[in-house]
Image (cartoon, rainbow, N blue to C red):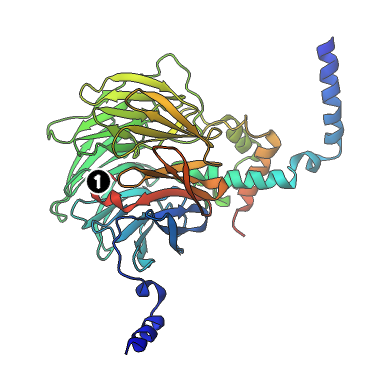
Amino acid sequence: MLERALFLAVAIPTAVVAAQGPDATAQPDAPRREVLMHRLLHDCGSCHGMTMKGGLGPPLLPDALADKDSEGLAGIVLEGVPGTPMPPWKTELTQEEALWLVERLKQGLTP
Amino acid sequence: MRWLVVIASLLLPAPLRAESRGTGDLGIVVERADGAVQIVETSSMTTLARVDGLGDLSHAAAVFSRDGRYAFVFGRDGGLSKIDLLDQRVADRIVQAGNSIGGAISSDGRLVAVANYEPGGVKVFDTATLGLVVDIRSTEIGEGKRAKVVGLEDTGGDRFAFSLYDTGDIWTVDLADPAVPVIQRFFDVGDQPYDALVMPDGHYYLAGLFGEDGIVLLDLWDPKARPRRILDGYGRGEEPLPVYKMPHLEGWAAAGDQVVLPAVGRYEVLIVDRRSWEETARIAVHGQPVFAVARPDGRQVWVNFAHPDNGVVQVIDLVTREIVETLEPGAAVLHMEFTPRGEQVWVSARDSNEVVVYDTETFEVLARLPARSPSGIFFTARANRIGY
C-alpha cells in the first residue's frame, strides 16, 4: 500500500508536466544541454568521430539518420547494440535526453 | 656590424631566429577539438608553439621521423600532417582517406603507413614527399565496403602488421622492395580485433579481441608461425560490463618478462609471463583500464580508466604488483606519456583543459600546462622505439 502511494506521488507530478505538452519534457535545460553536447562530441565522438563521419562506429550524419525512427535510435543509445562495441548509455541518459541527442544529430552538428 | 646582425635577425620569422637546438626533449600535445597540436619541451616543461589546421583530431596519434624533427600526425578524417617541430609549422599535409585510425613508421624512416577505416586498408607514403608508395586494400565485406584496419604497427625493418576488425584477420607486409609488397594474410583468427601492439623487440604482435575474451599472438620471428590464442576466455563465467571506452593497446606495458594488459569490460589488469604467455596475476583496479603504460624502466605501470572513472590514474609497482598511488589529475584523463627516461609523466586531462606533469618517484605535480581538450601526448623518443 505504501509503495503504491509513493508511486502515485511520483507519477502525478510527471503527468502534470506531460500534460503541458511534449516540449516541456523533451528539452533538457540549458546547462544540461551543454553537458550533453560535450558528451556527444567527446564520448560518442571517440567511435563515431568528432564530426560524426564515423569511425569504428557508423556515421551519424543527418543523411545517414534521416529515414530512421528517432525513438528507435534513442533506444539504441540507451540500450546499446549487443555484439558490437556500442554500450548502453541508460545509466547516464534519460529517454528524453537520448531523444534530444538524436534530434541534434538529425539536424547536423555543424552550422 | 653587430647591430646589422641584430637587425637582420629581428627581421627573420620567429622560429628561425631561435637558437639551434636538438629535438630529444620535444613532443606534441594533441588539442583534439581544435584540430591543433602544441609543440612542448620537457626540460623546462613549457609549450613552445601551437600548430593548427590539422582537421578532425579525435583519436589522433603520431609517429616521429628518425631524426626526431618531424611528427607525422594521423587524423580521424584521413589527414596525414607532417609537423616540423623546429620550424614549428606544418611542413606538408595530405588527406589520404575518409576515415583513419593511426599509423606507423619504418625503421629507416622512409615509409609512413596509415590504417584506414574508409576505404578500408593501409596506405603507405614516402616520408619525404608524402607521395603514395603502396596501397594495400583490405578484404571486401559487401556493399562496396572493405574491412576496417586497426592495430597497425611497425615491426622492424620495412615490415608492418595490422588487423582487420570486421573479418578478424591479421596481415603482415614486408616492404623491403616497395614495388613488390610481400603480404601474409591470416584469416579469421579471432572475433573483432580492435587494437594491437608489438613487443619492443619486434618479436611478437598481439591483437586484443573485443568480441571474445582472449588475445591473438603472432611470432614475427618465425616465418612459419601462425597466430595462436592466449589467455583464452580469461573472463569465463563473468558477465562483462558495458565498455564506455575501448582499451588502447599501443601502450600495453611490456616490462621485462611481464606484459600488462587491460582486461576488456573488467576492473582488472592482467599480468602475463612473456615466455609462457600464461596469466600470472590479476590486479584489481579503480575502473575499466584504457591505457596501461610502463615507465621506460619497467618498474611502474600507470593506468587510466574509461568513463565514468576517468578522473583517476593508478600506479602499479611491478615488483610488488601493488597499487602504490591513486592520483586525480583532473577531469577526463585520456593519455599518459613518459619522458625518455621516465622521470616525468605527462597526463592529459581533457575536461580540465590541462596537461599535468608528475614526478614519477615522488608523485608530486611538477607543472600544469593549459591546453584545449588535450588528448594524445607524444614525445620524440618514440622515434627510437619499435611499435611506437
Answer whether residue B118 is visible to the viewer in this image.
no
Q: In this picture, is B9 found above or below B1?
A: above
| Residue sticking out furthest to the top | A1
**Residue at the spot 19% in from the left edge and 51% down from the top edge:** B107
Q: Up-down: is A98 above or below B83?
A: above
SS label for mark 1: loop
Q: Is residue B221 visible?
A: yes
Q: Chain of mark 1?
A: B
Instruction: Give coordinates of residue B84: x percent, y percent.
Output: 34, 64
Residue B183 image-quadrant placement:
top left
Tell which of B3 and B257 is nearer to you: B3
Whole-percent x, y for residue B387 in the image: 27, 43
Count the marks: how many?
A: 1
Horizontally, is B167 left or right of B306 in the view? Answer: left
Image side of residue B319 versus residue B362, left or right = left
Q: Position of residue A24 (x, y in %)?
A: 81, 41
- Looking at the figure, which quarter contains the N terminus of chain B? bottom left
From the viewer's side, name the closer residue of A89 and A15.
Answer: A89
Instruction: Look at 40% across and 35% down and name the residue there.
Output: B302
Q: Residues within 10 Å of mark 1 (few under 14, many from 20)?
A: some
Q: Which residue is mark 1?
A: B385
Residue B283, image x, y percentages: 40, 22
B113 left or right, relative to B336 = left
Residue B217 vs B334, above or below: the answer is above
Q: Amino acid at mark 1?
A: Arg
Comparing B186 with B11, the one in front is B11
